[in-house]
Amino acid sequence: MKKNKSIIIFLIKFFVTYFLLVTIYNTYLHKSQQKIDTFQTASITTAVANQTVKVLTFFGYQVQAIQHDKEVSVKLIIENQYTARVIEGCNSISLIILFISFIIAFSGTFKATFLFAVFGSIFIYIVNVLRIAFLTVMIYKYPHKVGFLHDLVFPAIIYGTVFLLWVIWVNKFSNLKK
């Protein structure tokens, strides 16, 4: 019975946290994205695109991020060639929500849970920006590999990062190990 109680508590904590954060995020998206007459991405998506530009500029590429005029996305133009686009799903927030929900569901002490959620989220965000930068360069250099790169390699990077953080959390900080 105690084992079932642990599973039920995990599920309740996970889904309550997840739906609360998703509701907050969807409210933010509803207020910050524009899809009528002109298109405008949410500020977090635009920030991810602009930070990707900064990373690629640091590595010597000529890059610009331009709001797409026909959809809610930001075009990434590398060396004057439209190469990739950043959409809402690329900004890592949905994945960070999933990450935080899991951390809270397997919570440790308040301090450990809070700090791991914050620093883990920042780490996921940074890995995501680097992932988009790398994807943009790879698509620019190897446009015939776009399907493989976008659909397999790059999800593996970001999901692998989240999974690794979850494993670290469960094994080092959560109350589950006790």
Image (cartoon, grey):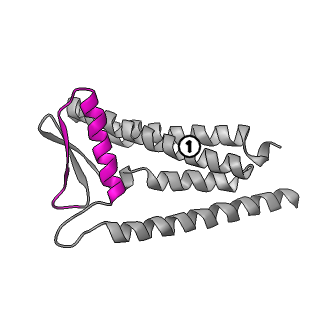
Using the image as rendered, state which of residue 41 and residue 159 is in the foreground: 41
Inspect the magenta stretch and tell me whether residue 61 lies in it. Answer: yes
Query: Residue 153: x, y in percent?
Result: 40, 35
Given the current orientation, which residue lies at the most extreme right position? 1
Q: Which residue is more in the foreground, 109 or 73? A: 109
Residue 155 visible in the shown view: no
Mark 1 crowd level (few <14, some 14–19, many ≥20, 10 Å Cα):
few
| Quadrant in the picture for residue 134 | top left
Tell me the quarter of the picture where residue 39 sits.
bottom left
Q: Give left or right: position of 38 versus 3.
A: left
- Residue at the left extreme? 80
Which residue sits at x=52%, y=56%?
Answer: 97
Left or right placement of residue 98 versus residue 89 in this view: right
Give the x, y percent position of residue 144: 22, 34
Residue 58 appears at what percent x and percent y? 28, 29
Q: The C terminus appears in which quarter of the rendering?
A: top right
Question: What segment is highlighted magenta in the picture?
Answer: 43-71
- Find residue 150 and report its image quarter: top left
13 shown above or below 168: below
Q: Residue at x 45, y 36 (%)?
A: 157
Residue occupying the point 70% across, 42% down = 170
Q: Which residue is mark 1?
A: 119
Note whether 100 is above or below 167 in the view shown: below
Whether residue 106 can be seen here = yes
The N terminus, quarter of image: bottom right
35 and 8: which one is in front?
35
SS class, disc 1? helix
